[in-house]
Amino acid sequence: MNTSESTIGIVGAGIGGLVAAIALRRAGHDVVVFEQAKQFARVGADINLTPNAVRALDGLGVGEAARVTAARPSHRISRTYDSGEETSRLEMADSAEQRYGAPQLTIHRADLLAALADMFPAERVALGKRAETIAADDKGVTLSFSDGTSARVGVLIGADGIHSGVRTAMFGAESPRFTGIVAYRAVVPAERVAGVPNLGAFTKWWGPNPQSQIVTFPLNRGKDIFIFATTPQDTWHLESWTAPGSVDELREQYVAYHPEARALLDACDTVLKTALYERDPMPAWAQGRMALLGDAAHPMLPFMAQGAGMAIEDAVVLSRHLDGVAMADIPAALQAYQTARIERASQVQLGSRGNNWLREGGNADWVYGYDAWAVPLGVPAQGAVAAATA
């Protein structure tokens, strides 16, 4: 893989990394992506792309491909866990497209990654490259990989997730805190729960405390239903999105929930389980010729369903800040990118931790109405601080 000090290197071929790679290449840069996995595999969670994320993908030319397998939730509904009372209902689908310029899409992560990979040259993705050491200087960054190879790039973007090696190289080791919450994920065929109402909506059942909830939404053009449930638990500390859990344990945690919510859990055959950890917003994402995006910059709890959306926004705004920028001016451009993104992402991170957003109505415009292709460069997003707690 040929690289040089005129190359932008990206560590991580996830959603944020591939969006950044496509956008930066469109901006005229030579880009290479380093991915530690030896091959792309159909793993990972099903994700919620709200209008802010879909509009960003549309501007990249990926939105049409994402729509092929995605579902379009009809509404975003909040319900009380035991009575089933609706406390808020937002129209999505066509209404969201009219209001925000894009609909909400719910899609398997692998389908979105496939659509992104189709738009970036496969020969510029280096698989099986786990970075062991990262050393930066005034002219570039040198990466040494576990397979004994190395690469030299002019700029390095860390899109390598919650356990980011780039972040550690820039700012040192982190100290995440276990929240005392675990999360379950499952997918069931829609036909198995055909009698349950609102299957076409994104529905959040708010539990008796902020740690307990069930979220459901359609997948695969409505053929399947995704279930994401959280509950307090202090005996499981593994942070992994692929570890198996117990279906019986899942059902036992939600016996006090409404029959319609329990019917979805009763339809589960298998479930995955992970512990949830929280990290505080970082004071900086950029340093010299290196910068972070996505979970590497702002790992967040999933309660606002904005993890993928924030990574996509980061990548687009980053590409705009580096469009036409000479290598000598990269450090200043990365600082401007940080200025433009850090306040908004931090407020979403804190809002996700608080887990109160849209519980009883509220205005979603500050999240859904953000346009990563149009926001001013080097300027913090407006209106996020007050809205994050609304």
Image (cartoon, rainbow, N blue to C red):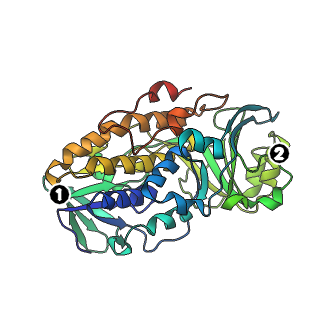
Please report the residue visible at 43 percent of the width from the left and 69 percent of the height from the top.
Answer: 37
Residue that badge 1 annotates: 140
Sequence-first disc among 2 and 1: 1
Give the vertical position of 11 relative to 232 (above or below). Answer: below
Q: Which mark is residue 32?
A: none
Asked whether residue 109 appears in the rendered view, the answer is: no
Whether residue 338 sits left or right of residue 115 in the image: it is left
Considering every residue shown, the one lying at the far top of the view is 386
**Residue 118, placed above or below residue 267:** below
- The residue closer to the viewer here, 186 or 97, is 97
Identify residue type, mark 1.
Answer: Gly
Q: Nearer the viewer, residue 179 or 226?
A: 226
Number of disc labels: 2
x, y percent for residue 337: 30, 42
Type of residue at label 2?
A: Glu
Q: Quadrant of the N terminus?
A: bottom left
Distance of label 2 from label 1 (alpha carbons)? 56 Å
Give the quadrant of residue 19.
bottom left
How many other residues sit within 10 Å of disc 2, few (<14), some (14-19) or many (≥20)?
Answer: some
Quadrant showing the C terminus = top right
Whole-percent x and y of residue 40? Answer: 48, 71
Residue 366: where, in percent of width, then height?
Answer: 50, 33
Q: Residues within 10 Å of mark 1 (few under 14, many from 20)?
A: many
On residue 260, the disc is: 2
Under circle 1, the secondary element is loop
User: Which residue lies at the image location 34% right of the left edge and 56% below the top edge?
Assistant: 165
